[in-house]
Amino acid sequence: MIYKDCVFQTENLRKNFRRTYKEQKQKKSMNERMLLITALLCIVLGLPILYIASHFVSSDDPRVLTELTGIVERVTAKEKVTIISVKPITAIPVVSFDKPNVKKGEKITVKGQLESYNGKLEFVADELS
């Protein structure tokens, strides 16, 4: 009788363990599915929202360089454009489509904006003084 009770309890423990293991495995796969669905929803909904929101963002950021003051290091005049190297920032050329009257060593203030041309930054001058 005691033997039968032990066998019966052992079988019950095995069934419970198997049932618990299967439930845990199902919960894990459900959690993984839920995570995958959430990630895909974020991508599908997030990208269009970011695209639409980008049209409402102003480019009048105070951190953007709009004025440059320095000493003229070099002036290269071409047919339609004049390229000026200004001393504190010689890596970014100042480009003017007017014919400015500037000389080497002169202190100037340039108002304009940074733009990319052929993959390189340049400061396009709107006003030279």
Image (cartoon, rainbow, N blue to C red):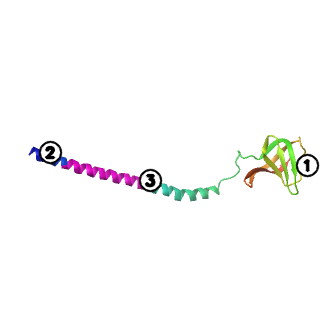
| Residue annotated with mark 1 | 101
Q: Residues within 10 Å of mark 2 (few under 14, many from 20)?
A: few
Q: Please give the label number shown on residue 35.
A: 3
Q: Which stretch appears magenta?
A: 11-33
Quick one: 32 or 109, which is closer to the camera? 32
Residue 123 can be seen, yes or no: yes
Residue type highlighted by circle 3: Leu
For the point 85% across and 42% down, which residue is it? Answer: 73
Three-letter code for the amino acid on which mark 1 is drawn? Asn
* Pointer 3 local density, CA inside 10 Å: few below 14, some 14–19, many at least 20: few
Q: Position of residue 87 (x, y in %)?
A: 82, 41
Question: Could you give the CA–CA distance between mark 3 and mark 1, rounded to whole angstroms?
Answer: 64 Å
**Prevailing SS of the magenta stretch:** helix
What residue is shown with label 2? 6
Image x and y of residue 123, in percent: 78, 49
Q: Residue at x 14, y 45 (%)?
A: 6
Q: Secondary structure at mark 2?
A: helix
Q: Amino acid at mark 2?
A: Cys
84 lies left or right of 117: right
Say which label, 2 or 3, has the lower sequence index: 2
Residue 15 lies within the magenta run: yes
49 on left or right of 104: left
Q: Is residue 52 left or right of residue 95?
A: left
User: Which mark is first along the chain, 1 or 3?
Assistant: 3
